[in-house]
Image: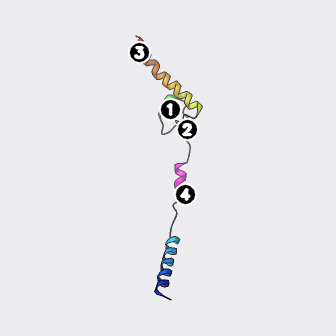
Amino acid sequence: MTLRSVLLSAVVVSASFLALSAQAHDPRLHEAAAAEPKAKPTTCAQLADTQKYSSDLADADIKALKAKCNAEKKAPAKAGKSK
């Protein structure tokens, strides 16, 4: 065996040990991130809490609730100006 072939086989053996020692992380870490979808809000207070409740405007119910809540916010402001 030549020095070149000895070095090549040492590199191959080292690389295979390195590849065999690789460890994957725990798949349960991904489950925690996608555990449960957020609840659908039914009140304006819930709509404002984006940590617990969904604010997806693609949902027709949430979009309607947002429009209703925005209208309620504007209504007292208009009533206060007319006095």
Label 1, on which residue?
A: 47
Q: Earlier in the sequence, mark 4 or mark 2?
A: 4
Report the label total. Answer: 4
Region of the chain picked out in magenta, as a range: 26-42
Mark 3 and mark 4: span between their CA atoms?
A: 56 Å
Mark 4 and mark 2: span between their CA atoms?
A: 25 Å
| Magenta-colored stretch includes residue 18 | no
Residue at left offset 56%, top offset 42% = 37
Q: Residues within 10 Å of mark 4 (few under 14, many from 20)?
A: few
Q: In the rendered structure, which amino acid carries the disc numbered 2?
A: Ala
**Residue 60: mark in rendering:** none
Q: How crowded is mark 1: few (under 14 residues within 10 Å), some or many (20 or more)?
A: some
Label 3, on which residue?
A: 80
Mark 2 and mark 1: span between their CA atoms?
A: 10 Å
Q: In the rendered structure, which amino acid carries the disc numbered 4?
A: Pro
How would you classify the magenta stretch by its main secondary structure?
A: loop
Mark 1 and mark 4: span between their CA atoms?
A: 32 Å
Q: Earlier in the sequence, mark 3 or mark 4?
A: 4
Label 2, on which residue?
A: 39
Residue at left offset 47%, top offset 32% = 48
Mark 1 and 4 residues: CB-CB less than 8 Å, in contact? Answer: no
Label 4, on which residue?
A: 27
Q: Residue 14: percent from the left, percent from the top?
A: 48, 76
Q: Which of marks 1 and 4 is nearer the N terminus?
A: 4
Q: Which of marks 3 and 1 is nearer the N terminus?
A: 1
Residue at left offset 50%, top offset 81% = 9
SS for tag 2? loop
